[in-house]
Amino acid sequence: MLLAKIVCAFFAWSIVILSIASVWFSWEKGRKHLQRLHQIPCNRCVFFTNNYRLKCTVNPIKACSEEAINCIDFEPKVKTCHSCHNSSKIPFLKFLSKILLVKNLREKI
């Protein structure tokens, strides 16, 4: 009778431990897969169209897949055009807009 309880407890704890290990390994596998998917650079590329019909204009078959991780045609998006944006002109433009505003107000009076 005592031997049956020991064997039953052993199998019960074995099932619990194996279940926890299975959940842990599944979690780790999913985490590694997500890390790999976050390496796909397509949404940060100039050629990415964000259109489901044509995701990429250069490599439409590889776009948004794991094959695109080391894409040789990757060009990062630039938020502003550095050749067009000249910060030294901004104070002058603010000054000019104030002058024009004052001039328009004087004409209305």
Image: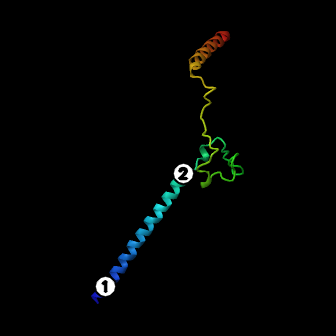
Residue corresponding to mark 2: 38
Residue corresponding to mark 1: 5
Judge by depth and name the residue closer to the eye, 80 or 107: 80
Farthest-out residue, bottom: 1
Where residue 18 sits: x, y (%)?
Answer: 41, 72
Q: Is residue 16 above or below residue 4?
A: above
Judged by depth in the image, the label closer to the viewer, 1 or 2, is: 2
Look at the numbered disc 1 and give the secondary structure of its residue.
helix
Residue drawn where x is 66% and y is 53% of the image: 62
- The amino acid marked with disc number 1 is Lys
Mark 2 Cα shell of 10 Å, populated few (<14), some (14-19), many (≥20): few
Residue drawn where x is 43% and y is 65% of the image: 24
Q: Is residue 108 left or right of residue 31?
A: right
Q: Mark 1 to mark 2: distance in Å?
A: 49 Å
Where residue 7 sits: x, y (%)?
Answer: 33, 84
Residue 88, by quadrant, is top right
Where residue 2 sits: x, y (%)?
Answer: 27, 87
- The amino acid marked with disc number 2 is His
Look at the numbered disc 2 and give the secondary structure of its residue.
loop
Judge by depth and name the residue closer to the eye, 20 or 25: 25
Q: Is residue 102 above or below residue 6?
A: above
Q: Is residue 17 above or below residue 42?
A: below
Residue 65, by quadrant, is bottom right
Which numbered marker is on residue 105?
none
Where residue 4 sits: x, y (%)?
Answer: 32, 87
Q: Is residue 91 left or right of residue 107?
A: left
Farthest-out residue, front: 72
Of the image marks 1 and 2, the number of the one nearer the N terminus: 1
